[in-house]
């Protein structure tokens, strides 16, 4: 770490020094210093609230990536997954149904159930959203999105080890009557429509209503990977005198359609003599969904020894019916001690999903509720000090009845989880001189969790040389739906008719509570080299609470921790027409929670979370924006990332050879298990290089403007699945987009043509291998294109 930080410090400091000289020296005219001073306008100023206060992005002494509302609308971002193409440090995956997983610079976890917490703090309108399944339906009528990479343990608290993602809607505007509409139509019968109305309510109040409708047909041959989403948001804002502002908002969203679909990438083949697996690719292109008759026939040819017959076709049902609701309040009161902010909130989600991740069938029926309250007092320049003091309370319950079915192995999980979290925090900035500041912060978090759940696993095994007529177990949410007798808990296996198969039942009960407390800290130094050049260095650590799992032998896991060191510089040159921001980071991740599909202590497949890893994530990020002419905007974002597990060991039952790409051996501590050693492997979703390029050119044509926009993203190879199998590695790729827009000079309407994924490459973004040897992948959309109309009133 010392060598890395010294090297990057020298580079950034040298660059910062040259920047001071560049702003004071007599520079010859160039593309960024035209002889005509009016030839180019400066870059736009962006105000952010990443540090819980409003400030210029270039004055915020933390790394922040901002995507404006206009950029989100132009890119037609309607889901969290689509943010990955705009934010270089972010990787977002769909895990089936409403499940969403987030990774930032290789830090994250595969949170595919309702009782494992994400590693990123997803904040919608200033409210932390505890469930990664509840992050849809928010991407419309937005002011901006802010991505803060790295732990945010002081201001954002628990479960922000990877970072914080802030989704910030547009608020009502006093005294303004306005409306906007944006609609596009494209291939796959795609419709993306959103609109808003802002209306004054007298002189001191305003109302804003916004809505969104997104639909398209399935990108896969079986009709899956479609979208049927709708959402509404209403807000009222009132000013009650010069010191008091109150805002109230309510939002609703629905997620329908079939949802994300999967394709078969491989079916593993075991070489009994060598004791190894091979993973030949299937003959299908990625657009062939696993419910397609071609894919079903491949599955039906798969012989599974444990059941003594070939598999049968998958249940063809797939749909999602998810409803999200939220109520948010915000009270701002200016006191003699500073600005007091209160944010009470309530959110709920009702999930009803059927999907086929991993080549099986999953039924999800859950009700999630959360209440939260945050209080902050922010004071400026009390003597030489700025300060922020705050408190936070979070309460969440999740009731679930979920079934994970592999035809001959049926797992019904019924549970209730409860979380209560309390926190107090402080951040103080000391102005040591006009240009020098020291920053310190502390947060204490107390987490209490209670979990009550039962997992009933029913397995069919063949007790004869073959069992060709053995039935399958249908996916359902009740034991009574199983069409044959099953044994009592702990009872002897029962024969299933005269098929030669036996039914086995194993039950896992979890009724436990845990309580943990943790202090997280922030320390930083900020130096204004010039009015437009900032140099900063920060230390911040993060804490991710422990929890539970309904898997024998893995019922609890401990908290994880991360320490992060950052050195950065933010700069503007040539009258604000060139912006160069650079950041070097070094993260140490320990007691790492690893969530993955695996085999529990009873030999049954399950979704496990264990403290199995420690990693080092380091790199450099550079953001460049340039406006060489008023009508030209160029941007480049480059990230170099070296994220690697220093220690990553876990166990699997010593039965058949495990389907893993890491070395393994018999566990010396327990010969009944294999010890899998993935130490030294790169972290998940951690490409070494990421490059985003964008160019925008405005051309005047009479009374109109023609806006040409082109962008591309390059990523080197990355591992998208837990097992480190070759088919789970996504190779390097380019993905490019382009659009052309015609608008009048007053910009009150526009018409555009667009194309996305010009290369027409379906890129694997998530992958897994099942216990029956089916390797499945989910891919990005193919090439899409269409027309877009926009208007403001």
Image: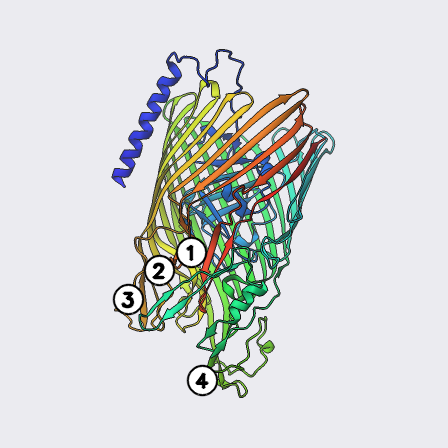
Residue under pointer 4: 463
Measure how far apart labels 4 and 1 are at the Cα level: 34 Å
Measure how far apart labels 2 and 3 are at the Cα level: 13 Å
Precedes in sequence: disc 1 or disc 3:
3
Query: Callout 1 environment at 10 Å: few (<14), some (14 to 19), or many (20+)?
Result: many
Q: Please give the name of the residue rendered at 37% of the width and 18% of the height, measured from the top-left corner.
A: 22
Query: Callout 4 environment at 10 Å: few (<14), some (14 to 19), or many (20+)?
Result: some
Which quarter of the image is occupied by the C terminus? top right
Q: Is residue 676 above or below residue 572?
A: below
Q: Where is residue 715 in the image (x, y as percent from the top left)?
A: 43, 43
Measure how far apart labels 2 and 4 are at the Cα level: 32 Å
Q: For the residue labelled by badge 1, is the local secondary structure a helix, a strand or a loop?
A: helix
Q: For the residue labelled by badge 3, is the local secondary structure a helix, a strand or a loop?
A: strand
Residue under pointer 2: 661
Q: Say whether marks 3 and 4 touch (CB < 8 Å).
A: no
Residue under pointer 1: 728
Q: In this view, does 387 lie to the left or right of 403?
A: left
Using the image, tell me which numbered label, if any, was put on residue 9: none
Residue under pointer 3: 665
């Amino acid at each position: 770490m010392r060598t890395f930080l010294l090297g990057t410090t020298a580079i950034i400091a040298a660059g910062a020094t040259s920047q001071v000289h560049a702003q004071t020296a007599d520079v010859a005219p160039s593309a960024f210093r035209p002889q005509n001073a009016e030839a180019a306008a400066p870059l736009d100023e962006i105000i952010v609230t990443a540090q819980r206060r409003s400030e210029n992005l270039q004055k915020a002494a933390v790394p922040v990536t901002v995507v404006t509302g206009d950029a989100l609308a132009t890119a037609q971002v309607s889901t969290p997954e689509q943010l990955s193409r705009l934010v270089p440090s972010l990787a977002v995956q769909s895990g089936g149904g409403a499940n969403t997983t987030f990774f930032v610079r290789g830090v994250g976890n595969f949170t595919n159930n309702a009782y494992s917490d994400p590693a990123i703090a997803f904040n919608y309108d200033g409210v932390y959203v505890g469930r990664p399944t509840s992050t849809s339906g928010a991407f419309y009528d937005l002011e901006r999105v802010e991505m803060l990479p790295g732990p945010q343990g002081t201001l954002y608290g628990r479960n922000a080890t990877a970072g914080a993602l802030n989704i910030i809607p547009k608020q009502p505007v006093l005294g303004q009557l306005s409306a906007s509409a944006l609609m596009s139509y494209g291939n796959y019968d795609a419709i993306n429509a959103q609109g808003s109305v802002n209306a004054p309510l007298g002189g001191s109040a305003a109302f804003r209503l916004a809505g969104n409708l997104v639909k398209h047909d399935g990108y896969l041959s079986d009709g899956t990977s479609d979208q049927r989403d709708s959402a509404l948001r209403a807000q009222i804002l009132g000013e009650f005198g010069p010191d008091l502002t109150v805002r109230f908002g309510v939002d609703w969203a629905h997620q329908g359609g079939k949802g994300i679909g999967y394709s078969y990438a491989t079916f593993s083949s075991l070489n009994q003599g060598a004791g190894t697996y091979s993973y030949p690719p299937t003959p299908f292109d990625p657009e062939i969904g696993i419910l397609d008759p071609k894919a079903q026939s491949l599955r039906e040819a798969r012989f599974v020894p444990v059941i003594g017959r070939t598999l049968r076709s998958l249940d063809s049902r797939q749909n999602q019916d998810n409803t999200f609701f939220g109520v948010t309040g915000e009270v701002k009161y200016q006191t003699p001690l500073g600005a007091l902010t209160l944010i009470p909130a309530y959110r709920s989600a009702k999930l009803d999903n059927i999907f086929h991740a991993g080549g099986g069938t999953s039924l999800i029926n859950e009700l999630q509720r959360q209440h939260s309250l945050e209080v902050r007092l922010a004071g400026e320049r009390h003597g030489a000090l700025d300060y922020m003091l705050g408190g936070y309370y979070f309460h969440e319950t999740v009731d679930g009845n979920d079934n994970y079915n592999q035809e001959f192995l049926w797992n019904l999980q019924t549970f209730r989880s409860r979380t209560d979290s309390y926190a107090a925090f402080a951040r103080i900035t000391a102005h040591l001189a006009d240009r020098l500041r020291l920053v310190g912060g502390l947060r204490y978090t107390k987490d209490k969790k209670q979990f009550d759940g039962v997992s009933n696993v029913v397995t069919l095994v063949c007790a004869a040389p073959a069992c060709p007529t053995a039935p399958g177990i249908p996916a359902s949410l009740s034991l009574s739906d199983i069409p044959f007798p099953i044994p009592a808990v702990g009872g002897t296996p029962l024969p299933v008719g005269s098929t030669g198969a036996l039914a086995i039942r194993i039950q896992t009960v979890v009724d436990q509570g845990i309580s943990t407390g943790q202090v997280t800290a922030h320390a930083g130094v900020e130096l204004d080299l010039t009015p437009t050049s900032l140099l900063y260095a920060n230390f911040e650590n993060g804490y991710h609470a422990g929890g539970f799992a309904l898997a024998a032998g893995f019922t609890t896991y401990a908290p994880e921790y991360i320490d992060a060191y950052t050195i950065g510089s933010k700069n503007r040159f040539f009258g604000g027409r060139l912006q160069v921001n650079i950041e070097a980071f070094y993260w140490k991740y320990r007691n790492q929670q690893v969530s993955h599909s695996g085999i529990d202590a009873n030999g049954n497949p399950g979704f496990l979370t264990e403290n199995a890893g420690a990693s080092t994530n380091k790199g450099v990020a550079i953001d460049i924006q340039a406006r060489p002419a008023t009508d030209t905007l160029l941007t480049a974002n480059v990230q170099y990332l070296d994220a690697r597990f220093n220690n990553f060991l876990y166990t699997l039952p010593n039965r058949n050879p495990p389907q893993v790409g890491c070395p393994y051996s018999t566990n010396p501590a327990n010969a009944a298990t294999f010890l899998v050693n993935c130490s030294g492997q790169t972290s998940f979703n951690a490409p070494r290089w990421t490059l985003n390029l964008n160019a925008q050119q405005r051309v005047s044509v009479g009374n109109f403007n023609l806006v040409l926009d082109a962008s591309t993203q390059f990523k080197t190879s990355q591992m998208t699945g837990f097992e480190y199998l070759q088919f789970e590695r996504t190779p390097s790729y380019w993905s490019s987009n382009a659009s052309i827009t015609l608008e009048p000079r007053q910009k009150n309407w526009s018409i555009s043509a667009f194309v996305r994924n010009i290369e027409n490459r379906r890129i694997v973004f998530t992958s897994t291998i099942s216990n029956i040897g089916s390797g499945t992948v989910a891919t990005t959309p193919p090439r899409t294109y269409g027309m877009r109309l926009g208007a403001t009133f």
